Amino acid sequence: MDSVRVPPTEAVGGTVHLPADKSITHRALLLAAVSDRPVTISGPLDSDDTQATLTAVVRCGASAQGDLGDAVVVRGRGLRGLRPPPALDCANAGTLMRLVPGLLVGQGGDFCVLDGDDSLRSRPMDRVARPLRAMGANVFTAPGGTPPLVVDGTAPLRGTVHDLPVASAQVKSCLLLAGLFAEGETWVREPAASRDHTERMLAAAGVEVLRDDGAVGVRGPVDAVVLPDLAVPRDFSAAAPLLVAGVLRGDPGVCLPEVNLNPLRTGLLAVLERMGADVRVEPGPDVGGEPSGTLRAARGPTLHATEVAPEEVPALIDELPLVGLLGAFAAGRTVVRGAEELRVKESDRIATVVGALRALGAEAVERDDGFEVVGGGRLTGGEAAAAGDHRLAMLAAVAGAASDGGVTVHGFEAVGASYPRFGADLAAIGVGVDG
Ligand code: S3P
């Protein structure tokens, strides 16, 4: 396990060209694997999670040339031509394990067992297995609804209306993919809108995406998907920790060009605005069918505490840990509610975020569905464990830069899931990362 020490940093500044979007890279690789034409994906994310997806599509019979991080040309097998192996390793990638069954149920092949690392093995997969079974598919989990997930592609599928109990782009995406093979219409309704990268990419690939009163659907069976070549925009979730470093210690501040600004991802910007942070957004041209632009953040006046309401949660689900960190520096009580989903992420992020913030000197408490942080305007620093969770490792490192005494982050290598260059990019804006 790698430990790094991040000392306090007074002045953070510089421009960072962030890594590509993880969610969009997973989707581009999966849809290219079933596309009727070779697809050039420019600038896909090179990380542990997306490597797992590239390996999975190749093991299912697609061919891929080039490198993640540069460009990959995927030659797919057509919508029904994948040949899944008996077992696929999803490593730590929840997005892979939840999206790929939506394709495998339509391939007509034998059973495929999807498994992953210890963290993935603890995450709920019945949320895709149950609705897929409602469509007629043969999909099974271990007792308790966790991996391994067993999927076969032989059963005929029927279009189904799904009412999701919690908003989830992974579940919605899986069901829309399965809907491509089903007889009739498949609809997904969520309690609040989640990220729509799959819908955008399906539409670009020639699939008619149906919409009705907040629900989204497809009409199957679809003959073919023809994904055009695409460039992957930079990841807002990778921008977030650097944006927060800029807000807390930016002098002259950070500049983050060409970031994906899909409004269903950028909920953190509204929260930062309410807190009084000095963050500017300069819209730019669309990239890969998604809005993008430049973000700038500098240290401003003292932040105000804020409340994140349940309906805001899906648009900043992966950034909520950073809201906890911001809360430690804000005047008043910062409250996050309606975010019980955090308990089933790469770690139990309610417990791990509160635990890390408290270990670093903040006053923070867990709630069943979120957390509360009483801002003291500063953090003492100390030691924090990443708990195998990339978002927690990044939070702890930024906390180190903003703290009085620095932070030792144990298990820093977890950043590799989404942002392997994170340490180098922190150094580029003046934050020391020793170890
Ligand atoms: C993702 C959706 C979100 C998010 C995850 C990536 C995606 O998960 O937390 O990091 O790529 O669709 P849920 O669908 O479980 O909310």
Image (cartoon, helix red, strand yellow):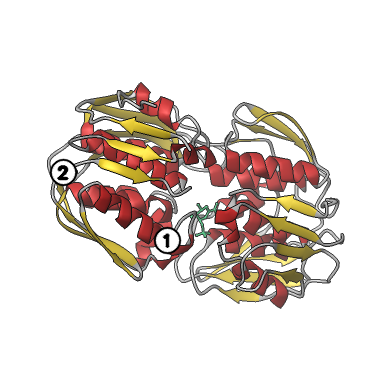
Residue at label 1? 342
Tell me which corner region of the image, top left, top right, bottom left or bottom right, holds residue 146: bottom right
The reply to whether dot 2 and dot 1 touch (C-beta < 8 Å) is no
Between residue 88 and residue 260, name the one nearer to us. 88
Between residue 312 and residue 389, name the one nearer to us. 389
Q: Earlier in the sequence, mark 2 or mark 1?
A: 1
| Observer able to see residue 207 | yes
Amino acid type at image mark 1:
Leu
Identify whether 418 is placed above or below 217: above
Query: Crowding at label 1, few (<14), some or many (≥20) Cα neighbours within 10 Å?
Result: many
Residue 31 at what x, y percent from top left? 70, 48
Secondary structure type for disc 2: loop
Amino acid type at image mark 2:
Arg
Residue 10 at what x, y percent from top left? 19, 27
- Residue at 40 percent across and 67 percent down: it is 340
Tell me which corner region of the image, top left, top right, bottom left or bottom right, holds residue 115: bottom right
Between residue 293 and residue 401, name the one nearer to us. 401
User: Residue 432 vs residue 258: left or right?
Assistant: left
Extreme-front residue of the structure = 1
Secondary structure type for disc 1: helix
User: Residue 343 vs residue 220: left or right?
Assistant: left
The label on residue 378 is: 2
- Residue at 66 percent across and 43 percent down: it is 52
The answer to whether the beta carbon of the residue marked 2 is less than 8 Å from any atom of ligand 1 is: no
Residue 64 at what x, y percent from top left? 76, 34
